[in-house]
Image (cartoon, grey):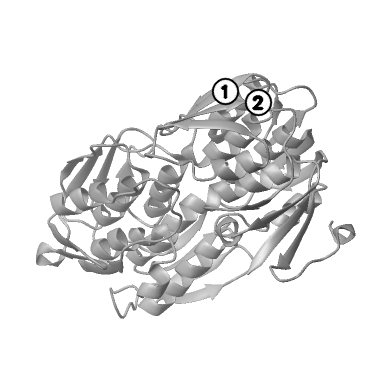
Amino acid sequence: MTKYIVQGGSPLFGEVHISGAKNAAVAILPAALLVDGVCRIENIPQISDVTVLLKILEQLGAKVRVLNRSDVELDCRHIITTRAPQELAHKLRASYYLIGALLGRFGEAEVSMPGGCNFGGTRPIDQHVKGFAAMGATVREGDYICAAAEGGRMKGANIYLDVVSVGATMNIMMAAALADGTTVIENAAKEPHIVDLANFLNSMGADIKGAGTDTIRVAGVERLHGGAYAIIPDQIEAGTYMAAVAATGGQIRVRGIIPKHMDCITAKLQEMGVEVEEQDDDLIVRRSGELRHANVKTLPYPGFPTDMQPQITTVLTLASGTSTVTEGVWDSRYRYVGELTRMGAQIRVEGRTAIVEGVERLSPANIQAYDLRAGAAMLIAALAADGVSEITNVQYIERGYEDIIGKLRALGAKIDCVEENDEPPIRQIG
C-alpha cells in the first residue's frame, strides 16, 4: 500500500492543466455499449476508475484500443455477455451505469451492487430502478442487480424523479436512447456531466433534448453509429486546486476549464477573500490575505457541489470566525472531520451541518483518506499544515485525480509517494 508524505506550510505557485471530467468519463465509457460502431473518446482522465471500466468493457466483449495518454477507441459491436464481472464492478460506484447501457442496447443486464466510496451516508439506487420499471423492465436486487426489458426492448415513459439524482438521470437517459418511443425525465439533474453525456449520445445519433434543464426528452432511435467525442474538463478537479491555493496561499493558473462550470465554486471562494480572475479558458486564483468565514450549503447544480464539500470545509478551518457547512445532497458526508480535528481543526457536526470555528493554523498529523473527495481534503490540510504529515488509504484519491502528486509538485508542493513500510528521510521530500 502507498502513502503520501507531505511537508506543508508553503504557498503554491505555477499553473495546472485540468484533465477530463471523472464524473462524465465514468458514464460516457459505459454509454459506448449503446453504439453500434467504433467510437473514439478523447480527453479521458488517467484515473483508476477509468482503468477498471475499460477492463469491464473488455470482459463484456468490447475491443479497447488505447490511442494515447487520454484517447481511447471502443468497438462494442460484438458484446458476448450482459453480465458484468463482479470483482471489477464492485470496485466503483459508477458500475451502475452499465445497467442502463446494457438494458438500452440488449434489453437485459446483470451487474453486481456498486462499490466505490462510502462516506457515511446511504446512496440508494431506488430512482434508477423506478425509471427502469416505468420503461417496462423487471428489476431484481440482491448481490446482483438483474434487469430485463419486456419483449427485449425498453419502452418510452414519463418519469418523475422523487429526488434530483445525477446517477438516475444519466442511467435513464442511456436506457431510453434506443427505446421504443419517447421518454420524458422530469425533476432531472442539471450537472455539466449530464449535458456531456447527452452531447456524446447525440453525436452518435441519439435524439436527446433538454439536458441541463429539469426536463429531458429522449426520443428513442433504432441505432447509434460510431464517431469521435471529447470529454469536458473536470469541474471538481479544478475546484480542488482552487481550494488548495486558498488554504496555502500563493497564486496559480488553472488551465483548460469551462469558466461557467466554475461559477458556483468561484463565488464562494471570492466571498472568503480569495481572488479569482477569468482569462478565456483559464482562471487565475490567488490568496495573500486573511480568509473570511462563510456559510456553505451543497445543492444540485448550479448550486455548490457536494463533491467539493470536504475541500471547502478544510479551507474554512483556517478562516476567521465561525462558518457553517450544510450537506444538502447526501444524508451525511463528514467521516473525514475526525481527521481534521486531529490536526487542530475546531469542527462540530450536528446532523447534516458542520459548525467550523476557524483556527490560526493546522498541525501536521498521520491521517487517512476515507473516500475520494475526503482524500483530496486531507491533501489540502497536509499542504496547509506547518510540518510533515502522512496520508494513508490514498487509493481513494487516485480513483478520481489524474497525477495529482505530479501536478501538486509542479506547483511547489513537497510530497513523496512511498510504500507504507518505507520511511524516507524528510530531507528527501520534494
Q: Residue at x 44, y 66 (%)?
A: 91
Check disc 1 and report its element: helix, strand or loop.
strand
Which amino acid is tagged 1?
Ser
- Can residue 105 be seen from the camera position used here? yes
Tell me if residue 417 comes above or below residue 400 in the rendering: below
Q: Which residue is drawn at 59% across and 39% down?
A: 311
- Categorize mark 1 by other alpha carbons within 10 Å: few (<14), some (14-19), many (20+): many
How far across and down, in percent of the image, does residue 212 sit?
Answer: 39, 36
User: Which mark, residue 388?
Assistant: none
Which of these two is toward me, 64 or 253? 253
Q: Which residue is drawn at 31% across and 33% down?
A: 214
> Which of the marked residues, 1 or 2, is nearer the chain's N terminus?
1
How far across and down, in percent of the image, does residue 324 sit?
Answer: 52, 24
Which of these two is toward me, 131 or 369? 369
Mark 1 → mark 2, Cα distance in angstroms: 8 Å
Q: Residue at x 27, y 34 (%)?
A: 187
User: Which mark, residue 323?
Assistant: 1
How far across and down, in percent of the image, does residue 403 sit?
Answer: 68, 58
- Categorize mark 2 by other alpha carbons within 10 Å: few (<14), some (14-19), many (20+): many
Q: Are discs 1 and 2 less than 8 Å apart at CB?
A: yes
Residue found at the very far right of the displayed protein? 427
Which amino acid is tagged 2?
Gly
How far across and down, in percent of the image, does residue 15 sit?
Answer: 77, 44
Q: Mark 2 points at which residue?
A: 358
Which of these two is toward me, 235 or 10? 10
Considering the image in quadrants, where does the N terminus appear? Answer: bottom right
